């Protein structure tokens, strides 16, 4: 009975997510009717808006939201801490620092087919991940509160460097950095989608593949080791793939917060704590959530457009406080 109830909930979640993804491209300053699409009665401008602007935007939002939600789910399980996310661990701020340096330099360049912003975001995220691993080796993974506080400290430090870069930059670079820090999915064409897809897909495949091991690690390293799990290799695999996915997502859409904390906890409340189930559901739910937030951002004040990071922060701030109060008894080192 419990399994059947969970299956029904998964189906409902997938249907609602699919409905949101299907409706989002139709809404905006210029509404597009489904009947016009089915009958082929779109004007040239509507066709351009739909296929060159809104569909890439929805796909990019889905991939970025899925990557951020997946990162939150995995880090919370690895560290056994409900407040662990790519943001609270400093990984997103590291990626933000890398992209901010690209805007500050003001020189357009690419390497291995990746834009300079994406490449430097990878470097910043990798730096933050290296700091986390260094702290892990110094204090031990069991002291999860220490890791979380270290992540917060890294976030503040990187944020201060970004502020210094903004202060030292010219007006154009400052405007680009401030607008980018607010988060946004404004794209034309599919270049950003092509860039993010392989990294998000790799992170999802590894997370689904290693979800049984993730369940064991979430219960404790000793239990995982006794069941034959190579804990260190598994953790490194998760960190590497998620660092790449989150770095790419932050470089392309900005440091959009709270997706990695709201979506995993909502999924757990609905479906339980089995990561084999949560991994694909969190990715879909995170993608749909960010797409819905972006749809609100570009329709609330239409034809003006709000940065989507403002919408997620308005929703995520109260959620974070509720979660902090709800877990106040469980924030001790384990």
Image: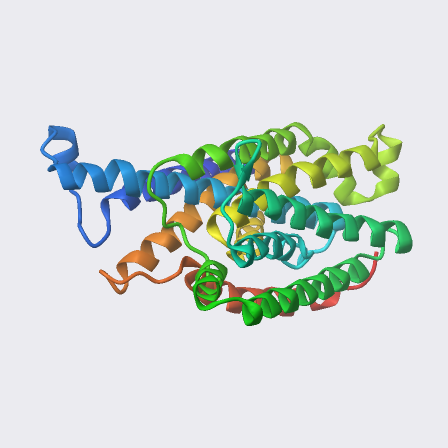
Determine the residue positioned at 83% across, 31% down. 230
Given residues 302 and 319, the one toward you in this image is 302
181 left or right, relative to 234: left
**Relative height, residue 168 to residue 106 (above, below):** below
Given residues 38 and 278, the one toward you in this image is 38
Given residues 62 and 193, the one toward you in this image is 193
292 left or right, relative to 123: left
Determine the residue positioned at 36% across, 43% down. 57
Q: Is residue 169 visible?
A: yes
Quadrant of the drawing holding the C terminus: bottom right
Quadrant of the drawing holding the N terminus: top right
Residue 19, x across and y down, in percent: 32, 40
What is the quadrant of residue 48 in the picture? top left
Q: Is residue 141 visible?
A: no
Determine the residue positioned at 49% across, 33% down. 197
Residue 240, x across and y down, in percent: 70, 38
Given residues 37 and 12, the one toward you in this image is 37
Q: Give the colour scheme shown.
A: rainbow
**Relative height, residue 153 to residue 225 (above, below):** below
What is the quadrant of residue 223 in the picture? top right
Residue 95, x across and y down, in percent: 61, 51
Determine the residue positioned at 31% across, 38% down. 55
**Relative height, residue 79 to residue 280 (above, below):** below
Residue 290, x across and y down, in percent: 43, 50
327 left or right, relative to 282: right
């Amino acid at each position: 009975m419990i399994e059947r109830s969970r299956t029904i909930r998964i189906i409902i979640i997938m249907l609602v997510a699919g409905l949101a993804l299907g409706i989002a491209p139709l809404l905006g300053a210029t509404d597009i009717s489904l009947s016009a699409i089915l009958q082929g009665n779109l004007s040239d401008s509507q066709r351009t808006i739909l296929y060159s602007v809104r569909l890439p935007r929805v796909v990019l939002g889905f991939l970025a939201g899925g990557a951020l939600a997946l990162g939150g789910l995995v880090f919370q399980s690895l560290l056994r801490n409900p407040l662990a996310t790519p943001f609270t661990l400093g990984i997103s701020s590291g990626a933000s620092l890398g992209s901010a340096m690209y805007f500050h330099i003001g020189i357009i360049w690419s390497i291995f087919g990746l834009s300079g912003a994406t490449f430097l975001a990878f470097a910043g995220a990798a730096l933050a991940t290296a700091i986390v691993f260094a702290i892990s080796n110094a204090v031990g993974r069991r002291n999860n509160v220490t890791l979380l506080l270290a992540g917060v400290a890294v976030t503040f430090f990187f944020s201060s460097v970004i502020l210094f870069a903004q202060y030292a930059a010219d007006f154009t670079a400052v405007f680009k950095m401030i607008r980018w820090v607010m988060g946004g999915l404004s794209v034309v064409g599919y270049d950003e989608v092509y860039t993010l897809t392989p990294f998000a897909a790799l992170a999802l495949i590894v997370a689904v593949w290693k979800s049984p091991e993730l369940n064991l690690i979430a219960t404790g390293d000793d239990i995982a080791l006794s069941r034959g799990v190579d804990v260190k290799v598994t953790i490194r695999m998760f960190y590497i793939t998620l660092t790449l996915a989150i770095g790419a997502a932050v470089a392309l859409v900005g440091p959009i917060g709270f997706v990695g904390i709201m979506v995993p906890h909502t999924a757990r409340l609905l479906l339980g704590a089995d990561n084999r189930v949560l991994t694909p559901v969190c990715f879909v739910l995170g993608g749909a959530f960010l797409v819905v937030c972006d749809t609100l951002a570009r329709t609330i004040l239409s034809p003006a457009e709000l940065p989507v990071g403002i919408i997620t922060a308005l929703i995520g701030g109260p959620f974070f406080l509720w979660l902090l109060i709800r877990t106040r008894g469980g924030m001790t080192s384990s």
